[in-house]
Image (cartoon, rainbow, N blue to C red):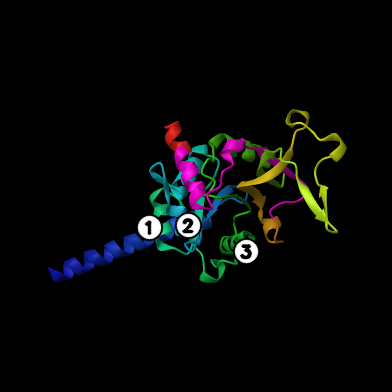
Amino acid sequence: MCYIIMIALQILCFTLVLQWNTAQVDANSFCSTNDLHALILARGGSKGIPLKNLVEVNGLSLLSRSIITISNSSCFKHIWVSTDDEKIALEAKKYGALVHIRPEEYARDETSSIEAIKEFLEAHQTIQNFALFQCTSVFLKEKYIKEAVDKFQSHDCVFSVKRSHQLRWKLVDKQILPDNFNLKARPRRQDWKGDMVEAGMFYLSKRVLATKGLLQNENCAVVEIAAEDGLEIDTYRDLTIARCIMDNNA
């Protein structure tokens, strides 16, 4: 009887290992070089708001919100979460994302996003096109994603921008001078289109650029998002604002 149970357990273990290996192969070897993959960088060591990626807004964590919206767009082969944190990894898996375990040396305060992206791409050689999403951009929308993916078909890179009508000044040789307007023809808001400012919501790019340490080149397109959707959660104040907006729109 004990012998039969032992054999049954061995078969079960073998089956589980086989299933795990099959999933790993499906996530890596069988990815077409033309497929677009979504990538979220979510390390556990955030300082402003501890474990910021898991903080909830209207009942969902920032990470889960991003995964759900990206998944609903149906634009990606896989959604990946690169993390060094077990809790973040569990949250990612809970909502259907694949987890890339990021080495500690690529999850430090001084580690740049492009360094973490290069480490991810080095581990997944078949991925040629990717979309980096910031889960701190809590108002990510499917329509922005679909527009970006459409434009990516004919460009090397696509990123989100928001419109700014702020009049900027600069300090030159201890003198304050206007930077983006003519002092003698001070524009009214309705008289000019304003400046395009990176929103940080997403960046679609190619492996060939990332390996050079770049996300953008001269062949880029942009997706302009509404100013009210451009809030990024970096501080508790941002978090309070986001929650108030969500509550009022509920």
Q: Which of marks 2 and 1 is nearer the N terminus?
A: 1
Secondary element at image label 1: helix
**Amino acid type shown at disc 2:** Ile
**Amino acid type shown at disc 1:** Gln
The front one of 18 and 173 is: 173
Extreme left residue here?
A: 1
Query: Where does label 2 land, which residue?
Result: 49
Magenta region: 215-244
Query: Where does label 1 land, which residue?
Result: 19
Is residue 195 toward the left or the right of residue 121 in the image? Answer: right
Q: Residue 2 has which mark?
A: none
Residue under the point 43% across and 51% down: 55
Q: Which of marks 3 and 2 is nearer the N terminus?
A: 2
Other-residue count near label 2 (Cα within 10 Å), few / some / many at <14 / 14–19 / ≥20: some
**In the rendered image, which quarter is residue 5 located in?**
bottom left
Q: CA separation, marks 3 and 2?
A: 22 Å
